[in-house]
Image (tube, rainbow, N blue to C red):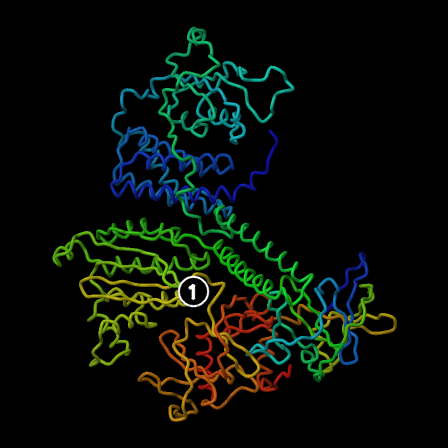
Amino acid sequence: MSTVDLSQFHKTFFEESLEGLDAMEAALLALDSGQTEPELVHTIFRAAHSIKGGAATFGFADVAAFTHVAESLLEEVRSERRGVDEKLIDLLLHAVDCLRAMLARSRRGQPVADADSEALRAELVRLVGGEAAPPAPAAAPNAASVAGWDIRFTALPHLLQSGNDPLRLFRELQQLGRLEVLRAVVVDAAPAQLAELDPSQCFLGWELRLHGAVARADIDAVFDWLDGDCELAIEPVADVTPAALVAAPPLPVAPLVAAPAPKVDPGPRRIRASAAASADGGSIRVSVDKVDALINMMGELVITQSMLSDIGEHFDQSQLERLREGLVQLERNTRELQESVMRIRMLPIASVFNRFPRLVRDLEHKLGKQVRLELHGEHTELDKTVLEKIGDPLVHLVRNAIDHGLETPTQRRAAGKPETGTLRLEAYHEGGNIVVQISDDGAGLNHAAITAKAVQCGLIRPEQELDDAEVAALIFQPGFSTAAQATDLSGRGVGMDVVRRNVRDLGGSIGVRSQSGKGSVFTIALPLTLAIIDGLVTAVGEERYIVPLISIVESLRLRPDMVRKIAGGGEVFHFRDAYLPIMRLHRAFGCAGAVTDIERGIVVVLEEEGRRVGLLVDDLLGQQQAVVKSLEAHYQRVEGISGATILSDGAVALIVDVGGVVRLGQQRSEAA
Amino acid sequence: MYQNDQGTAPTVQQLTFSLAGEEYGVDILSVREIRGWSRVTRIPQTPAYLLGVLNLRGAIVPIMDLRLRFGLEREVYGDSTVVIIVALAERLFGIVVDAVSDVVDIDPAAIKPVPDMGVIVDTRYLKGLATHVERMVMLLDIENLMRPEDVETLDAALSHVQEVEVAA
């Protein structure tokens, strides 16, 4: 065998192993929730086994050794020699965490084993030793009673094509005990003429004897990957004497005796299918459907292009109608192509949702609450960038919901509610947005505590009466609560301003509805993608600026009597029972030739972080989808500007960063 | 200060251009393209020498006026006014110069360090001086030209001239 640089496969190994761990975790949690399908155990076993195999192949000995012990334990479960209880699941979940950490360390090239992993390994080894295991069924040959195993292993011709290497198998067997090759045979199906021999096919079989008291499970594990690629018979050797050796039956080369081994589960081999694409790294796994759609679209575009160039070659007035049709078609093709390309970046939200069953389980135990987690709409797709950034805010909200929202079983019983609280996560499309809802049937926001806190913080006056919506809005106030204050506040609000800022950074919005005693619902609306925004093109002097539509409340032309000058040079205007400050964009950005009369320009009312301002521009030019380009790619960040886009005439227009402009306006007015 | 590699001295090719009657050179390997002057989009909160950004096949590329960068009088842009797009690592930026002259071979050994020329030209932006056919060529240090901390310090220094409008 030629030597191959295995390090090129490391990235894939890590990705697949992490996915395997996700699958293991999901299956363990399913077992924990009382499901008993044997397939779950098989899934866990297979995941552990692939990780072990991969780790051994790629030289991560510590990972392989650790997984090996976990796998032995799992094998006991799989062969029903050990029952599944909560303690075991806890232990295995801990093992999953531990393996994740080990993989992370191997990835960084750090020493893999640490105190935690060693302690856990010792614990697993002790358990495998059998103290907790119920007595093995009589049918299972006890490792202690056998002196060795006869293994008849005949490769099917396609064995090598499946990536298996008999040599590697033998090496693995050798690690279990002394391996003796009794004989090797050529299969009947082998071509008689050497010239006809296909080097990519394998026509060999072996009779092997493994000496020593080796557990049957360990041998099965070695051959586990070869299911369907070989014929296998494994029989215990009670007494290895020359006589027994002679008595060994001649190897029948044709179909072998069905192995008495527990048949390796024929179910789906690749666990990957169940694991959502990992958010890690710079690669996306794209389904073939999406690529095919893209290629189709591309084909149509090429056809349209050739049609248009045909018209262009011999153009006369009579073809005007055809040209128009062609352009309409081109527009449609472009739009479809754009949608398809954007769809490549879209990944199901399941990859974020999948971490919650574990989080909920851990919190349940820690806080002594009972929670039923419902996940809906996991297949809703989101832009990869949005997906990566929405995880933390969601974790925060889920943690808050369990910590502060849901009551303890005793409290719930007293309130006449079922002891188990329900936490529901749901994702769905609404308009051009993705909506993610986190709802619980807990106590709802604690009106009194929040109001008291707000008074203490000076956000409201003590005599102020607030309705539910106003109370809800309070929890998003910056600095409303810090970790220290959160403990004595039974309402919510732990860093909710951070959650809101994260959501806003993604161009989204967050709201909350709460009903005392019934629960609360947090609703996050997110844009489908960050790459394209809906913008309003505004003119200021000679420049054009794009204002994101999501921040715009209303645009209006002010009458002179609506504007008031206030001390210090600021200007305000009356808008829906409030006075809003006017921000002159031409002043903030230093634009020449702009309209300076407020009455002659247009005021765009913007909302940012709950604050509203009126932005004075010369004129509104229209609405446009803007492909966001970064200024930082070739220059640097500029205050008040979130990016740039290219207009239909090829010129560059800057996109206004509403928050930045508001801050800029405050600085200017303070300086003035 | 420029330090030349003694021993291995293949000639370096420089694209030369004129600016206020002087001859400057920029390493041809960092030049991406040369284009005529076209309108740019001004960026707020930037020093005056940064004229703005333009769309270079989908990339948003900043353009600076080298005369303003060197504190010289600004010229009215004419037919010969060109923008040299240079690349620094992965970043592109354009410099507006009076006219592009030539591509010349310069022996690195013949590059002299820059004497202190006082206030006429900021020597920070020069790598060295070279002579080509009896003409002096000042070699630009483009890394220093686009350094952000310079932009910041200059930003502070030039904040009072921000009202000077760029008539594009």
- Is residue A45 left or right of A490 when viewed as pictured? right
Q: Position of residue B8 (x, y in %)?
A: 80, 56
The quadrant holding residue B59 is: bottom right
| Up-down relation of residue A459 to residue A7 (above or below) | below
Q: Nearer the viewer, residue A64 or B100?
A: B100
A367 left or right of B29 in image:
left
Of residues B31 and A293, the one nearer the viewer is A293
Seen in the picture, residue A265 relative to A420 is either above or below; the reply is above
Residue A406: give x, y in percent of width and height: 22, 58
A451 to the left or right of A536:
left
Residue closer to the observer: B37 or B2 = B37
Residue reaching furthest front?
A318
Quarter occupied by residue B140: bottom right
- Which chain hosts label 1? A
Residue A175 higher or lower than B51, as above or below: above
Quick one: which residue is furthest to the right in this view? B133
The N terminus of chain A is located in which quarter?
top right
Residue A648 lies, in percent from the top left, at 57, 70
Identity, as a three-letter code, of the amino acid under mark 1:
Leu
Residue with the mark numbered 1: A506
Mark 1 Cα within 10 Å, few/some/many (few <14, many 20+)?
many
Query: In which image quadrant can residue A98 be found?
Result: top left
Identify whether A568 is placed above or below A662: below
| Residue at 35% over, 40% down | A120
Q: Residue at x 54, y 30 (%)?
A: A161
Label 1 secondary element? loop
